[in-house]
Amino acid sequence: MLELLLALPFVLALVVAVLRDVPRAATAWLAASAPLLGLAILAWLTPAVMAGEIPQVSYDWIPQAGLLFDLRLDGLAWMFAGLILGIGVLIVMYARYYLSSADCAPRFFAYLLLFMGAMLGMVLAGNLLLLVVFWELTSISSFLLIGYWTQRKDAREGARMALAITGGGGLALLGGVLLLGQITGSFQLDVVLASGDAIRAHPLYAPMLGLVLLGIFSKSAQFPLHFWLPHAMAAPTPVSAYLHSATMVKAGVFLLARLHPALAGTDLFFYTVSGVGAATLLVGAWNAIFQHDLKGLLAYSTISHLGLITLLFGLSTPMAVVAGVFHILNHAVFKASLFMAAGIIDHEAGTRDMRRLGGLRRLMPFTSALAIIASLAMAGIPLLNGFLSKEMFFAEALEISGHDAMRLGLSLVAFLAGVFGVAYSLRFVHDTFFGDGPRAVDREIHEPPRWMKIPVDILVVICLAVGIVPAWTVAPVLATAARGVLGDALPAYSLSVWHGFNLPLLMSIGSMVFGVALYFGLRRLFNLHAIIRRSLGHRLFRINVKALLMLAWRFTSAIANGSLQRYLLLMVLATLVLAAAPFAAGLLSGTPGATPLQGGGGQPMPALGWLLWLVMVVAAIATVALHRQRLLALIMIGTVGLAVSLVFVFLSAPDLALTQLLVEVATIALMLLALNYLPKASPRGRSTLRRWRDTAIAAAAGLGVTALVYAVITRPTQTIAGELLARSLPEAWGSNVVNVILVDFRGFDTLGEITVFGIAGLVVHALLRRTRLTADEVIPGDPIALPMPAQLSHLLFPLALAVSVYLFLRGHNQPGGGFIAGLVLAIPLLLQYVIQGSAYVQQRLGFDYARCIGIGLLAAVGTGVASMLFDAPFLTSGHADPHLPLIGEVPLASALGFDAGVYLVVFGGAMLILSMMGAVKSKDAPPAQGNAA
């Protein structure tokens, strides 16, 4: 059931994204069905979770790396899943009426469901590496949601900032998780949580803790990484409400609670987490007082409350953990309702600026009452849910033991935070719903549609119910969630509204009195509407981004200056350094067999081998000597390629020989097409010094390749080749071990290679389809007719097609295969492009090479997936020997389907690249219509 619970948002996101023409109401119902069905599954699992059981499922993903697709639902995960799904349903209902007719609802709901699925995956993950995967997916999906209004600059900037900060924190978290796995020997959450003593005693504890906390602090907007959250308010209000209440920023405090048994219990944890939480608590609360935007005030209040939760987990006492979990619940409820109320005000009044609002209680009495109650819950007023967790916070700050200075300091911080919280809550209420106004509003303000208010109604009722009768409402939920963190160490506590007159109650009363005094005192002493507070963190972030972009621009200008010679020079130099490093290390270490030249002995070179070697050397020297005469140099380099093919024949490697020969023919033809746009002769070198430099680098590269080849051909014969030869026929049902390696033993590598090849073809197509170039020299008169080559190219195509099919079918047991067959089929078409031009070939054939690439990739992937239907790993080969009439028994391997995909991708990619080179138009030609291929 956990698999279905996780899959629902992702499946419905895909459905919503595809069904773009469905009415908005139907789209919203489709989107809401994911969290509704998820809540039904969660309700079915609730009795087991409350009884202390942990439902769990596990599948192997990459077990060699310790990555398992493991899902577990303990009390903490159950609480967060309930928040994600429950508030998610209300957000979908609210967004149905919030979005304007100009907004693309399917795209919005698809992003929202993707976000919901990522959060569910993170809280359900039973493997830390899997948790990191979903953690990063939350950053990506939140980036899409924050930047949903792509036409707005502030939305784009806010999305980029959020992704940069949280994505960077995600990299730190990955490093910390890898260290944590190294310490415990496992990435399984159960193992990690049970290894707390070993983790805290390990020498890597401090760096691991620092990396993990950096990831947590960046996600939960802790000081000094808090500045991204207010700028994320450029997102639509439903996104802001969801992000602040049940997702994204709560991901950090979830992970803090999740790993608390393994990481807490040291002074380093206590001072770091408590200190950062206290600083965030005060910075967020103080800045919230001076915001003018409703969502800006709520954003800074979220930062403050996240600091409060972080501080409670930093204290690490069992009761502080209970208070932290309790405040996660309370904050989710009142903050979601407040953001929705702010969105309603923006929706109806056209502004969120409190300087233009005021007096809305007369125009929107019902919405005003809901927002005021939720604001009082945020301020921690009695008989509302926020009061209970705030009193717990005060009590825990007063009861810190063993750290007298810390107790005094945190008690003062708690009291000040309470004062500031009352002040900014009072400003939210007073400046919006009381006083004169509204001002400079260009629309008639009224209550929103009924169904737009219902989510706020539900959440405000929960605030009241929890605040008045907590033992009947939230107590079982809190106990189950806290047990998920503390286990058997769950303390005894009371959720009574009245605990008598005590110091925490006096602190609550004092914070209310001083909070009211602070707000009205600031209004009397200063003009709050005139104070503009700018974020230092945001300013530093923009300065750093500009500096980074400038550095990148300078580096790019110095390296990628348009000179192909420089690109080649840098690539060759980098290759030389990387290749020479292990060789030099072997020489310096003096380790026997460590250098590549220490092979296992050679064999005598026959006369034919010396002749081929001489041809290659002479052709290579001639290529260098004639490099300025481009056509002659091309002929010489083609001679080198042909000689290499003959070397493979000489070494009894027919597959390699065929491949080399066909690639050489295709490459030479491609360069012949390119020569049309290059001068006949290349310019002379700039200086003698540069020519000597290039000669030295070329010689070093040549000698390096020679050393590498020598090391390969003289190595011992007892290699993995013997094992592959022995396993080829019995396990893959093929006697051509080269083809078996490509389509079976290393099939996944081949799939990646043909994918890259197909992408390269599509990129070339995109770059050249509308390119306009001027030929270096235009020969006057009509093109010279070549009747004999043209007729021969016509005859060559059906012959090549037959040979291509023959090589493809025999490839599993004899030299051939999909790669070779694809090139054989491409070459006669390429010759027709060269001889008769692209227009003639396209008019005759009209072949869609891009579609051919897509069909080939689908065939290759489909063959791999088909094996999974028979409970075999991806791309596992199967075999059958069907008996055909008149033919008899025919041996068939499923790898033939994969090879067919290779065939189509190679043919389509090669032809797409080569045809585009032949189809480049001159600058004075009319624009091409449609696809060039």
Image: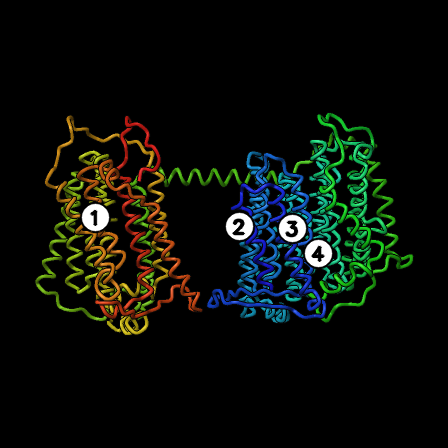
Closer to viewer: mark 2 or mark 1: 2
On screen, residue 150 above or below 666 = above
Mark earlier in primary sequence (4, 2): 2
Mark earlier in primary sequence (4, 1): 4
Q: Give percent across and percent down for residue 92.
A: 65, 46
Q: Give percent across and percent down for residue 669.
A: 20, 44
Identified by mark 2, the residue type is Leu
Which quarter of the figure is the C terminus placed in? top left
Identified by mark 3, the residue type is Val
Which residue position holds label 2? 14
Closer to viewer: mark 3 or mark 4: 3
Give the SS element for disc 2.
Answer: helix
What's the distance in space between the residues labelled 4 and 2, CA to CA? Answer: 42 Å
Closer to viewer: mark 3 or mark 1: 1
Circle 3 crowding by C-alpha within 10 Å: few under 14, some 14–19, many from 20:
many
Circle 2 crowding by C-alpha within 10 Å: few under 14, some 14–19, many from 20:
some
Mark earlier in primary sequence (2, 3): 2
Which residue position holds label 3? 249
Which residue position holds label 1? 827
Identified by mark 4, the residue type is Ser
What's the distance in space between the residues labelled 2 and 1, CA to CA? Answer: 41 Å
Q: Residues at badges 3 and 4 in contact (C-beta under 8 Å)? A: no
Of residues 734 and 428, the one drawn nearer to the viewer in this rendering:
734
Circle 4 crowding by C-alpha within 10 Å: few under 14, some 14–19, many from 20:
many
Give the SS element for disc 1.
Answer: helix
Left or right position of 205 against 626:
right
What's the distance in space between the residues labelled 2 and 3, CA to CA? Answer: 25 Å
Mark earlier in primary sequence (2, 1): 2
On screen, residue 532 above or below 623 = above
- Mark number for residue 274? 4
Q: Give percent across and percent down for residue 286.
A: 74, 42
What's the distance in space between the residues labelled 3 and 1, CA to CA? Answer: 58 Å
